[in-house]
Image (cartoon, grey):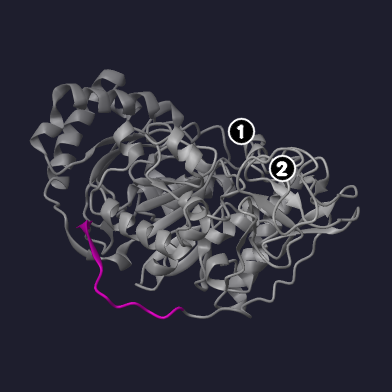
């Protein structure tokens, strides 16, 4: 696995560039470099101006030759590249690539840490622990979304929660699907898992479930024949059965009062950090993501896993080309093979829908210095640290294994986080280089800036600056330990920047697979 600091392979050359591995034939600019800049230790000057975070060739690279970063192939030169030249989209392509998956060949358990670290959380009857105590209004279909919002707004106007100080708020969970779809295919099963996961989430002290009545995602199928919440704090109704919008709002307020009263009985109590399940995301990545914030998050992930906690890596389309680094860490051959089955599914999914696995990096990623999906993926998997891969799950599938796991998802951040929350994540950590702004109720989201310039510009949205890893010589280990402490603080009730700003109202995005009919 990529662990630059621990392997001591990263070196600052000439005070202006960074070589990440001795095998690399490119270095990374640490500041904007003008044309003709000479760097100590090299016998060439920059061929053109090089933006911060972008790649520079350190030796002649022939057309068709592999370009190497992190000691791994990130693509092939499309033309001959001279030393000192900018290496980017005009001269670097993905090229053909094959990987040796070597399933389970490099898995090793990390030494456990039994230091009694804890956080203050909400203990639920099913044994899980919440980091927040919201009341949720969950919808089965787009057609009940407005009424869910009307109920939440009416509750706020009435001052309902003033009676219940232990409730963090009312969260309407609305979306754009639930009908116009098959009731039997993979898309239906995925939405069913997503809604079920939110209905049972430990960050909700109770749930009001609202349907229209005639949709494909029938409320009776979600509720019927089973107890969704072991504490019984779930009530449900349909707009058609209640007699329309006004009566549904009135009845909804009655239900909310009862649910909030039950949720209000919960108080924060000490819980071991093993009760934390952290969804790890990156969005708006740049050339620093794989150098600063992602490996720092990987180190924090290892600290949590060593204490019995769980971390979730996702975004299957954004580990493409680096999946071999995960299969080698799989605890069993079967776990590694399950990950590759998901990768093959994605290849087929893209082919069926006229897409490409190399549709990334996005325009913003490219402006930040990333060129191919191989390069982006190598930086993205750094979020997973060095722990063995303990499981592979479908989107929104309940996580039932502790440790470092993978959940299949698109690379679209709100959708991927939605799946992680549905799978049980009670905390999200999100790295960004360009400056993604978002939040994901009911789960708090910690934002990490990969570079100091963006952190200064968007400081009201960012929770932690990781740019000082390259700007001030802070070690990945020290930054990862700082992040781990911040995770405990937020899990115990500390507000994130996205919570202070009120994010979370539009970021519930179920993965819509299949035809819309």
- SS type, badge 2: loop
Which dot, 1 or 2, sits closer to the camera? Answer: 2
What residue is drawn where x is 59% and y is 69%?
1
Residue stretch in magenta: 110-123
Residue 210 at x, y percent in the picture = 33, 34
Q: Is residue 179 left or right of residue 60?
A: left
Residue 122 falls inside the magenta stretch:
yes
Furthest-top residue in this view? 246
Q: Is residue 306 left or right of residue 385?
A: left
Residue 50 at x, y percent in the picture = 71, 41
Quadrant for residue 97, please give it: bottom right
Label tally: 2
Q: Is residue 19 visible?
A: yes
Residue 325 at x, y percent in the picture = 63, 68
Q: Which residue is mark 2?
A: 359
Quadrant location, the C terminus:
top right
What residue is drawn where x is 63% and y is 74%?
328
Q: Which of the two labelled residues, at mark 1 and mark 2, occupies the earlier sequence position?
A: 2
**Mark drawn on residue 516:** 1
């Amino acid at each position: 696995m990529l662990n630059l600091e621990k392997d001591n392979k990263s070196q600052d050359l000439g005070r202006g560039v960074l070589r990440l591995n001795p095998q690399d034939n490119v270095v990374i600019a640490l500041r904007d470099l003008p044309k003709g800049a000479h760097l100590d230790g090299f016998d060439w000057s920059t061929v053109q101006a090089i933006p911060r975070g972008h790649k520079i060739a350190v030796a002649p690279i022939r057309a068709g030759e592999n370009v190497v970063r992190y000691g791994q192939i990130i693509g092939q030169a499309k033309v001959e590249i001279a030393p000192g030249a900018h290496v980017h989209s005009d001269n670097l392509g993905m090229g053909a690539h094959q990987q040796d998956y070597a399933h389970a060949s490099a898995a090793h358990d990390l030494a456990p840490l039994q230091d009694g670290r804890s956080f203050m959380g909400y203990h639920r009857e099913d044994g899980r622990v919440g980091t927040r105590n919201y009341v949720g209004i969950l919808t089965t279909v787009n057609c009940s979304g407005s009424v869910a919002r009307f109920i939440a707004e009416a509750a706020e106007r009435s001052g309902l929660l003033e009676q219940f100080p232990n409730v963090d708020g009312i969260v309407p969970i609305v979306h754009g699907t639930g009908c116009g779809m098959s009731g039997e295919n993979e898309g239906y099963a995925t939405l069913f898992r997503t809604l079920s996961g939110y209905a049972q989430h430990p960050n909700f002290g109770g749930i009001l479930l609202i349907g229209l009545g005639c949709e494909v995602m029938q409320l009776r199928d979600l509720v019927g024949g089973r107890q969704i919440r072991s504490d019984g704090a779930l009530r449900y109704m349909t707009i058609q059965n209640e007699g329309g919008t006004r009566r549904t709002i009135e009845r909804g307020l009655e239900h909310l009062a009862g649910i909030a009263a039950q949720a209000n009985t919960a108080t924060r109590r000490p819980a071991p950090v093993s009760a934390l399940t952290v969804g790890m995301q990156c969005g708006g990545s740049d050339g620093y993501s794989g150098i600063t914030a992602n490996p720092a998050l990987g180190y924090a992930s290892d600290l949590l896993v060593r204490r019995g906690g769980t971390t979730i890596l996702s975004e299957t389309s954004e580990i493409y080309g680096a999946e071999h680094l995960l299969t080698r860490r799989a605890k069993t051959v079967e776990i590694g093979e399950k990950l590759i089955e998901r990768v093959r599914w994605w290849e087929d999914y893209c082919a069926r829908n006229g897409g490409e696995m190399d549709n990334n990096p996005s325009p913003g990623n490219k402006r930040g210095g990333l060129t191919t999906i191989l390069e982006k993926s190598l930086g993205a998997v750094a979020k997973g640290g060095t722990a063995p891969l303990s499981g592979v799950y479908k989107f929104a599938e309940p996580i039932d294994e502790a440790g470092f796991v993978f959940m299949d998802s698109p690379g679209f951040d709100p959708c991927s986080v939605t799946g992680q929350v549905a799978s049980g994540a009670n905390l999200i950590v999100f790295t960004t280089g360009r400056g993604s702004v978002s939040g994901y109720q009911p789960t708090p989201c910690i934002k990490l800036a990969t570079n100091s310039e963006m952190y200064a510009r968007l400081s009201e949205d960012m929770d932690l600056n990781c740019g000082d890893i390259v700007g001030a010589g802070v070690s990945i280990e020290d930054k990862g330990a700082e992040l781990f402490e911040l995770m405990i603080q937020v899990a115990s009730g500390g507000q994130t920047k996205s919570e202070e700003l009120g994010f979370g109202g539009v970021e519930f995005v179920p993965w819509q697979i299949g035809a819309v009919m």
